[in-house]
Structures are given as structure tokens and as C-alpha cells.
Image (cartoon, grey):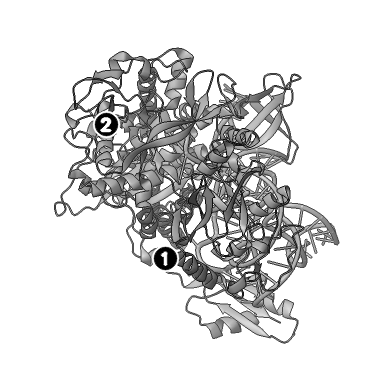
RNA sequence: GCGCUGGUGGCGGAAUUGGUAGACGCGCUAGGUUGAGGGCCUAGUGGCCUUAAAAGGCCGUGGAGGUUCAAGUCCUCUCCAGCGCACCA
């Protein structure tokens, strides 16, 4: 039986409309995507993907925003005639599940699956056009077995290797901590001072792809420039010179290698500095207790680069000397806490004359400062650092190199060093290999078996997947896998003797580095991907938070290239177009108690006090009426208690209003500051639209006006209608600006609501206008448009309608309005024939009241005419 | 610290190619409508100044300077905020 037309009611009831629309979509399988061999239908494919969520519990506003943007693109492209795929899955491994397990005693698996069920229900209630038949979760063995399989292929190809890496170690809980579990240098649960510790780990050789990852950024015109710039900086290709400083140690001749991009300043080197982890530091520390203590102090320090960069520059001499490779001077070697072991050679040449960090270091420890570059005669004083000291210039005080510019100096010095076998030009990357080992339970097991006799043995393909037990509950003291003999104890695949299974799991970034390929063929159980990937990939439009601009997007590009080189059906680049949505922010309110403890209050519980102009004067807590302080605006988070639950919004206003508000509030790429109040605008707009359609339909439907002669009074309406169609189509298809889509439709609605003409031709124009508005709005508010379309065209499905076309004839205008300026200031407007040329416009403007009033007979110096826009008279 | 992005009314934002700053919406003010409330409708709403009024003038896009007939938009310097910095995802 046909469901009753919900438009039989004069009022808009979102709960009824949304249930009906969703049932209709489910019943008709509206969002199933199938491969269409080219030639069959001729429809191009469009793979629209939003970054899959981590199942943290409930949807948050960032999810609603992300998936609404993706759904708008999906539905727009469907109506434009594309064969669209929009899948959804779950980035289901990760740390929060273990934290929840510790808090509640529930295994991470159960917590995760429960969250997936909740969030899936929420996504469905928002009416997203998702093909749920392709749903996948990375914590299922059917998915992560291919992580393991690909890991083994990479191991075979030398793209995976083992070496030691530095981790945060909590000495009380005897466990490795993630960076976010270290707060002010202490473990989050124990409060113990965190130590650095070196442990063996598996690395993926992403640096082998550095050159391609950098070069092919050029082939991504559909990516935001800023993301490409960030990736290029992150990969960090720098051209420089590798320089060796010879020294003698224990009778043997050795070389201290440094890398520099400023070889032209080599003659200004007054010291060398090595990282605390450098072998030379370790050697010197053996015979120097104070130095040993300093090295230890550095090693205990922070692991994160951001923290490292903010440390006070500290150092200590090693007592060792190296020889300057050109002039033979003795140069002292220091240990410096600002030297990174992971970059270049873990050692730098200190040129305080022309490097700001070296300058600060030299000042602090009284080391000599020797200027060797002249920057166009700008003054130099060793008293204080000046920004131009680091500029390129010509060599001075540099012996035979005097007078050379940067390029010539680098070439000459590199050539001289090469002759002595003490250096050469070199390219260095900032990008480091990707450490994927995690000493945690809830992740993909690394498929390696440790055998006393055979060493590290890969698990044979036939034994994959190495299944993760799902019933363990971590307690914060190390990895529970290591305490589970049924997992650890196994046989060596080579010799058959008793052996131990690797208990580290993979970084969850591995899971998310290829899921977009798997969506093409989630049911394939013989291989990670199959030929269906060739139909769907690459992703035509990828959408996700700007916070993923570097890591996730770089790792995904890397994995896609690795899979391509493995002979799998993968393209060179995974994402053709990328939209990075801004974060959702909210106000932060707090009170500082007498004890100094800070309590945060949710903005929903706070009332803003305003004066009669609406100017804000303060804020109070609703429950007790006493003031609270504002801490500005920040990302929605549990710790600042400033989250907004989208569920409340959906229940109060309906999914369409929630979607409409999210799209209207700001452009997708901008940060969005939450405001409860302004949702009333979009809510009222849908109510008004409903009423307009209801009233029109109640008076009887008529065929939509389809072009032809029109009375002059109705021409402006059709002009606005077709201008709106053109603008909205451009905003959807090219600009990705949905806030102006909504604004334009609202503006046009205001015009329609003012129409009083009830003639039959006016009713036909009205029918045309209402139909177009419903079609234009349907990607953003699909449920209400589904219902309104049935009211306007009984029996038809809005999703199967083609996108409205602009009628060029309606856009023709005889007269246009131009702006009149005198000396660049707005002085009036005039109407002129569209066909008027420059000369005629100038003549009309000079004779116009608004112009003559301000020129006062003064001599006209110049007249600027911009046809179609303005005339500016300069006197 | 380094890299990236942004800053426009009381608020979210618009201004797409250097060409009318403030579209659209919220809030606020006044009036109307409904038995009340919600809702709905109408008008006004950047600041300062002149005027009885009509109308008009000046200023105005974080700050300071510059280019141009014309700058929110381009250039230089500067301040502030957000995001990322490799084990959060």
C-alpha cells in the first residue's frame, strides 16, 4: 500500500516525513552502488568518500558536519547523472577502547561493537545515502588479515625492517605510553616521571617513496594548496652538502659527519654539536661524569618535537676536537640538546655568525662568533642577533672563497671537499621512516614469530590471519597479549620448535591507509583487492578534517603506491579531489574554585547576559545564577566539557534542519563556531517552504512554466529563479560553498513569498519555481524535499529527477544598473541599456545629476568605464 | 620553536576576476495576529555627525605603512587566534 501523502497536513512534522523517506529509501535499495561496465549506461562513476569514524561512542558535531558534506556531494552528483558510491566503515582499533576497558572492565571488542551499533543507528537517522552493504570494520579478521599479508609482502621487498626506536616509558606501570598519555612529562595514570626507552620496532620504508610522494603532489590539482604545501614541507627535501670533520680517536682516524644547507658558511664554523644519542657523545661520556649526567638528562627529556623545540638551548663540551676540513683549525665538539639524532647525521656544524640557534648557543657558552657572509653591506655586530644575518650574500673572511655568492660558494666548497674525500653534495629528507610497532593489545597483530634458533620468522600466508583474541581486558600495566600464553606460545614455522609470537600490534594508521580500496570489494576473501578496484578507484572526492592534512593522507598515498608496485589493482594516487573541512568549535566556560581547581561548564548550561543592544555583558550558570568565566573558543572536547550532542538537535528539530544548519553556518573548509540560537533560522525556513508548497498544492497543481512569453511583471521572478539555479549549481559543483547555496535559496524564497499574482500564468511560474527550489535543496535536506516533491509531482521520486537547467532566455536583460563614482567614491546609480558602449556610458555618466553635483564644473582628468559595472569620474 | 591557515557589525557569515562592504540567517527594537504560550506577519538595525523632516556627509573589513582612478581583495612590516609537529584518531 502507498504510504499516505504526509503533505495532507498543513504543518511540517519532520519526524513523520523523515521516517517515511528513510523507509522509502530502504525499501527501494536507493543507495546500492553497482559497477557498471563502460558502454552499458554511459554513466561516469563517482566515488565519494568521507573519512571513516573512530567508533568512540556517539556521533559528535564534527562527524555530522563531515558526513553531511559528503552526502551533499553524493546526492548532487547522483542528480547530475553519475553512478555514485558512498560507503561507510569503522576505524575500529585504537587506544580509547583500551582506556574504556580499564575504566569499565569491558573488553575493547565489546565496547567497540556496541559503539558501532549506536553510531550506525545515528548515521541512519541522518538519512545519509550510504551503501551499507559495503560496511567494514578494521577490527574484523577479514579486514586486518590483509594488513598482515601486505606487511609480509613489504617485508619481502625490504620495505619493512627492524631497528630500535624511542618510546615513552612509565616506570611504575611498566608500560609504553602514547604521547597523549604523557602530561607535563608524567604518566597520566601514575604521575611518574616518564623516561625515554629504546626498544626494537618494525619500520616501513616510506623514505624510499619520498621522491615520488613529493613529485606527484604536482599531479593533484584537486587538492587544497595548503595541504600540498604542508606535505611538501613535511617530506622536506633539502639540497645541501655532507661535510666530514676528521678526528683521531684511540689511534684511529675517524670522521664526524654533518649535513648543512649552508655550506657557504663553512669558514665561519666555530664549533660542532652532536645529539645526545650520537656515538661520539656516548664515547666522551664514558670518561666524563658530568657529561654523562648531561647526556642522561637529554635522553630523559621529551620525545615530541614540539616540546623539544621549546627547550632552553643547553650544551656541554665533550673535550674532543675535530679538524676543519678546509683550513685545518681545531674545532671543539659539544653535545647540544637542540640537535636531532633523527635528522641528517645527528650532528651539526656550529656557525653562530649566520644561524640563529647557533648564535644563541655561542652567546650562552662564550664561543667565538665569526661573520663570513656580507649581505649587501648591512651592518653586523655580535652583540645581538639580527634577522638578516641568516640571509644569502657573498663570502668574506673566507680565504679563497671571498666574493663568491651562495651558489658559487656551495659548488666550489663541495668540489674542494670531494677532492679531499671529506664531503659532497647531498639531498636530505626531513621525512623519517614510519615506525608501526605499538606495544598495545587492540590492534592488528604483527605476523612474526620469534624462534631461538631461526630468529624472526614471518608467519606463512596459509596461517593468516593471526587472530587477535577479543576477550582480554587491559589493566594499564603493559600489553595483555604478552600475558596470554595461548596467543604467545606457538611453533616456529621453519624448524617446528617452540617459539614466541610477536605481541606488538600495528599503528592504527595502517588500518586507515587502504580501507578506501577495500570498499570496492569488501567481500573478496582471496586477496586484499580485486578488479572492482579498477572501476571505482581513485576516490573522486575525499572529505575529512584538516587535522589529517599530513599523517593519514601521506600514509594513504604511500600505501597506495606500495600496493600498485605489488601488482595489485591500485592507482598511483588514491584521492583525486580533497576537501578538508574545518573543526567544530564551541565556547569554553569555567569557574576557578578556592582550591585552585578548575571546573568546566557546558555552554548549554550557561546563560549569556546582554544589554539592550544585544552586547554581551556576562555569563551565568543556569542552575545557580552565579557568574562563570569565559575561556574563549576551542575544539569540542570532553576535557573542556564544551561538546554538543547532535542527537538532541536531531530529536528537537529533525535531521534535515540539523543538516541544513550545519551547511548554512559556514563554508565547509572554515572552522565552525557552534551557536545553538541560530538554528532557528534554518528551522523556520523549512517550515515556511513547507507552507508555501502546501498552499500552492492546495489550490491545485498546474504544469510548470517551461519558457515563452511572459508579462513584464513576472519576468523579474523568472530572472531571479534562473540566476539562482545557475549560482546554486556553481556553488555545489565547483565552489563547494553550501552556505551560499542555502542563502541563495532563502533569498529566492523571500521573493516567492511576496508574490501576490494568482493568474494562471503566475501559478505556472510558481509551480516552476517551487519545483526548482525543492530540487536545489534536496541534496542538503533530502527528507523534506522527498515529501515536498510528492506534493508537487505526485508519484515521482525526487532522487530520480534530473538537476534543474537554467533557461538562458530568462536571464536576458535589456537594461542594467551601473554604479557612479567620483574620485573613487560611490555617488549614485544609473540605468543604462545593456548594449551601451564605453563612449555612451561615459556620456550618460557625465550628464548624470549624481556626478555633476560632485564635479562642480571642475576639469575631468580621467573617466574609467567598466562595462556592466561602473563609471568612475576623476576630477 | 618550526610549518600551514585565518582575522569583516552584538553573533555566524556574504562580497567568485582589484570595481556598490555587510547578501542570507541569528540576535535586538517597535508594531500586528492568536484565548495564553509557542508560532506567524510587518518595519527597523555598522559607527559618528548635520537636519524639524526629507535627505545628506564623514569614518569603517585586527594594527601601521604602500601601490592604484578604485583595496576586505595586491605588496611590506606587525599583533592575535586555530590546526599539525611523527605513539590521539
For the residue pair A59 and B56, the one nearer the viewer reads as: A59
Coordinates of residue A433 in the picture (x, y in percent): 40, 44
Coordinates of residue A193 in the picture (x, y in percent): 59, 25
Coordinates of residue A594 in the picture (x, y in percent): 76, 19
Local crowd size for mark 2, using a 10 Å CA cut-off: few (<14), some (14–19), many (≥20): many
Coordinates of residue A707 in the picture (x, y in percent): 33, 62
Instruction: Report the disc number at residue A31.
Output: none
Instruction: Report the disc number at residue A143.
Output: 2
| Residue A663 sits above or below residue A260 on the image | above
Nearer the observer: mark 1 or 2; the answer is 2
| Residue A356 sits above or below residue A587 on the image | below
Q: Chain of mark 1?
A: A
Of callouts 1 and 2, the N-terminal one: 2
For the residue pair A73 and A525, the one nearer the viewer reads as: A525
The residue tagged with tag 1: helix, strand or loop? helix
For the residue pair A269 and A118, the one nearer the viewer reads as: A269
Residue furthest front as drawn: A251
Instruction: Report the disc number at residue A811.
Output: 1
Q: Does A871 sit left or right of A524 as displayed?
A: right
Amino acid at each position: 500500500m502507498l504510504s499516505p501523502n504526509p503533505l495532507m497536513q498543513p504543518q511540517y512534522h519532520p519526524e513523520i516525513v523523515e521516517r517515511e523517506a528513510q523507509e522509502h529509501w530502504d525499501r527501494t535499495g536507493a543507495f546500492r552502488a553497482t559497477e557498471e561496465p563502460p558502454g552499458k549506461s554511459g554513466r561516469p562513476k563517482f566515488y565519494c568518500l568521507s573519512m571513516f569514524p573512530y567508533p568512540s561512542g556517539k556521533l559528535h558535531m564534527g562527524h555530522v558536519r563531515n558526513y553531511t558534506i559528503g552526502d551533499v556531494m553524493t546526492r548532487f552528483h547522483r542528480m547530475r547523472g553519475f553512478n555514485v558510491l558512498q560507503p561507510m566503515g569503522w576505524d575500529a582499533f585504537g587506544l580509547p577502547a583500551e582506556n574504556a576497558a580499564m575504566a569499565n572492565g569491558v573488553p575493547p571488542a565489546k565496547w567497540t561493537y556496541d559503539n558501532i551499533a549506536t553510531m550506525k543507528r545515528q548515521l541512519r537517522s541522518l538519512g545519509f545515502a550510504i551503501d551499507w552493504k559495503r560496511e567494514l570494520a578494521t577490527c574484523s579478521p577479514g579486514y586486518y588479515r590483509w594488513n598482515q599479508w601486505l606487511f609480509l609482502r613489504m617485508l619481502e621487498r625490504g620495505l619493512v625492517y627492524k631497528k630500535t626506536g624511542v618510546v615513552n616509558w612509565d616506570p611504575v606501570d611498566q608500560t609504553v605510553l602514547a604521547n597523549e598519555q604523557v602530561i607535563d612529562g608524567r604518566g597520566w595514570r601514575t604521575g611518574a616521571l616518564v623516561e625515554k626507552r629504546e626498544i626494537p620496532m618494525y619500520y616501513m620504508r616510506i623514505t624510499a617513496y619520498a621522491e615520488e610522494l613529493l613529485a606527484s603532489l604536482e599531479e593533484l590539482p584537486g587538492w587544497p594548496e595548503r595541504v600540498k604545501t604542508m606535505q611538501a614541507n613535511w617530506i622536506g627535501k633539502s639540497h645541501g652538502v655532507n661535510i666530514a670533520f676528521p678526528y683521531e680517536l684511540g689511534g684511529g682516524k675517524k670522521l664526524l659527519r654533518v649535513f648543512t644547507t649552508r655550506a657557504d658558511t663553512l669558514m665561519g664554523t666555530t664549533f660542532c654539536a652532536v645529539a645526545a644519542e650520537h656515538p661520539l657523545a656516548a664515547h666522551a661520556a664514558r670518561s666524563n661524569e658530568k657529561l654523562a649526567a648531561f647526556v642522561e638528562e637529554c635522553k630523559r627529556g621529551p620525545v615530541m618535537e614540539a616540546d623539544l623545540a621549546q627547550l632552553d638551548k643547553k650544551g656541554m663540551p665533550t673535550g674532543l676536537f675535530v679538524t676543519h676540513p678546509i683550513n685545518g683549525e681545531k674545532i671543539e665538539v659539544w653535545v647540544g640538546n637542540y640537535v636531532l639524532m633523527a635528522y641528517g647525521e645527528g650532528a651539526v656544524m656550529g656557525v653562530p655568525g649566520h644561524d640563529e640557534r647557533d648564535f644563541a648557543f655561542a652567546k650562552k657558552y662564550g664561543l667565538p662568533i665569526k661573520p663570513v657572509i656580507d649581505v649587501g653591506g648591512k651592518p653586523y655586530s655580535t652583540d645581538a642577533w639580527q634577522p638578516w644575518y641568516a640571509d644569502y650574500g657573498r663570502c668574506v673572511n673566507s680565504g679563497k672563497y671571498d666574493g663568491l655568492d651562495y651558489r658559487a660558494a656551495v659548488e666550489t666548497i663541495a668540489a674542494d671537499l670531494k677532492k679531499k674525500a671529506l664531503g659532497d653534495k647531498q639531498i636530505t629528507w626531513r621525512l623519517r621512516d614510519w615506525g608501526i610497532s605499538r606495544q598495545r593489545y587492540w590492534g592488528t597483530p604483527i605476523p612474526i614469530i620469534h624462534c631461538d634458533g631461526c630468529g624472526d620468522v614471518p608467519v606463512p600466508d596459509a596461517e593468516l590471519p593471526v587472530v587477535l583474541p577479543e576477550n582480554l581486558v587491559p589493566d594499564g600495566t603493559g600489553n595483555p597479549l604478552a600475558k596470554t600464553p595461548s596467543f604467545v606460545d606457538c611453533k616456529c614455522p621453519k624448524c617446528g620448535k617452540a617459539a614466541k609470537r610477536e605481541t606488538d600490534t600495528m599503528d592504527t594508521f595502517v588500518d586507515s591507509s587502504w580501507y578506501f580500496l577495500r570498499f570496492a570489494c569488501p567481500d573478496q576473501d582471496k586477496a586484499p583487492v580485486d578488479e572492482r578496484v579498477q572501476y571505482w578507484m581513485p576516490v573522486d572526492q575525499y572529505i575529512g578534517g584538516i587535522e589529517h592534512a599530513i599523517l593519514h593522507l601521506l600514509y594513504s598515498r604511500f600505501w597506495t603506491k606500495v600496493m600498485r608496485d605489488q601488482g595489485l589493482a591500485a592507482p598511483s594516487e588514491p584521492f583525486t579531489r580533497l576537501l578538508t573541512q574545518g573543526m567544530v568549535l564551541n565556547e569554553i566556560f569555567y569557574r576557578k574554585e578556592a582550591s585552585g581547581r578548575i571546573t568546566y561548564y557546558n555552554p548549554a548550561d550557561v546563560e549569556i547576559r546582554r544589554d539592550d543592544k544585544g552586547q554581551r555583558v556576562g555569563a551565568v550558570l543556569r542552575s545557580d545564577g552565579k557568574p562563570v568565566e569565559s575561556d574563549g573558543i576551542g575544539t569540542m572536547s570532553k576535557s573542556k566539557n564544551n561538546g554538543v550532542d547532535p542527537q538532541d538537535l536531531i530529536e528537537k528539530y529533525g535531521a534535515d534542519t540539523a543538516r541544513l544548519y550545519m551547511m548554512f553556518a559556514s563554508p565547509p573548509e572554515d572552522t565552525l563556531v557552534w551557536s545553538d540560537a541560530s538554528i532557528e533560522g534554518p528551522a523556520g525556513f523549512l517550515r515556511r517552504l513547507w507552507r508555501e508548497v502546501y498552499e500552492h498544492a492546495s489550490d491545485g497543481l498546474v504544469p510548470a512554466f517551461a519558457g515563452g512569453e511572459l508579462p513584464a511583471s513576472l519576468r523579474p521572478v523568472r530572472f531571479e529563479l534562473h540566476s539562482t539555479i545557475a549560482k546554486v549549481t556553481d556553488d555545489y559543483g565547483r565552489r563547494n560553498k553550501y552556505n551560499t547555496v542555502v542563502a541563495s535559496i532563502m533569498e529566492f524564497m523571500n521573493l516567492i513569498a511576496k508574490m501576490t499574482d494568482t493568474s494562471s500564468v503566475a501559478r505556472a511560474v510558481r509551480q516552476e519555481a517551487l519545483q526548482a527550489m525543492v530540487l536545489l535543496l534536496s541534496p542538503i535536506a533530502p527528507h523534506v524535499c522527498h515529501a515536498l516533491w510528492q506534493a508537487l509531482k505526485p508519484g515521482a521520486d525526487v532522487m530520480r529527477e534530473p538537476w534543474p537547467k537554467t533557461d538562458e532566455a530568462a536571464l536576458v536583460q535589456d537594461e542594467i544598473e551601473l554604479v557612479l563614482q567620483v574620485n573613487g567614491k560611490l555617488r549614485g546609480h544609473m540605468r543604462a541599456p545593456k548594449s551601451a558602449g564605453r563612449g555612451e556610458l561615459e556620456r550618460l555618466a557625465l550628464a548624470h545629476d549624481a556626478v555633476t553635483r560632485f564635479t562642480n564644473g571642475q576639469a575631468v582628468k580621467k573617466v574609467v568605464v567598466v562595462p556592466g559595472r561602473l563609471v568612475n569620474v576623476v576630477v
